[in-house]
């Protein structure tokens, strides 16, 4: 991933939302689980730092513009995903 900067933040956020939107169509609800990395990622601290801070900048930008993008993004675990999903399902 190219480093996120003030110059490319909006473009990269919209590209990320486009990709997440496509993936979200595979789910029958409005909560999507998107994994980052694979078994051989984050072997070095710099990999983690680069990914984390790039995604953090994107998430913060998108979440600051919820009215525009109609989305909210956050880091979470599989357990977090199922907690939110079950909470939504119980409120139906």
Image: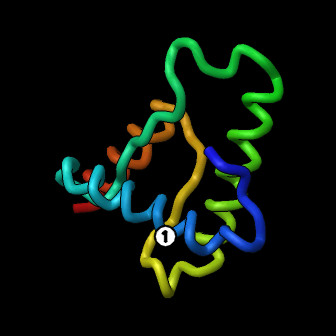
Question: Residue 79 placed where, x, y %?
Answer: 47, 31
Task: Pick the quarter of the image with the N terminus.
Answer: top right
- Secondary element at tag 1: helix
Give the residue displayed 66% in from the left and 69% down from the top.
9
- Above or below, 89 relative to 91: above
Question: Residue 28 placed where, x, y %?
Answer: 17, 52
Task: Pick the quarter of the image with the C terminus.
Answer: bottom left
- Above or below, 14 relative to 91: below
Taking the image as shown, residue 80 lies to the left or right of residue 44, namely: left
Question: Residue 78 placed where, x, y %?
Answer: 46, 31
Residues packed near mark 1 inside 10 Å, few (<14), some (14 to 19) or many (20 plus): some
Give the residue displayed 57% in from the left and 13% down from the top.
40
- Identify residue for label 1: 14
Give the residue displayed 27% in from the left and 56% down from the top.
22
Closer to us: 82 or 72: 72
Give the residue displayed 73% in from the left and 51% down from the top.
3
């Amino acid at each position: 991933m190219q480093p996120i900067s003030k110059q490319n933040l909006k473009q990269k956020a919209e590209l990320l939302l486009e990709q997440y939107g496509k993936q979200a169509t595979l789910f029958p609800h409005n909560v999507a689980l998107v994994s980052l990395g694979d078994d051989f990622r984050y072997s070095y601290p710099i990999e983690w730092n680069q990914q984390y801070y790039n995604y953090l900048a994107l998430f913060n930008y998108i979440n600051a513009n919820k009215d525009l993008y109609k989305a909210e993004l956050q880091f979470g675990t599989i357990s977090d995903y199922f907690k939110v999903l079950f909470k939504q399902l119980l409120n139906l």
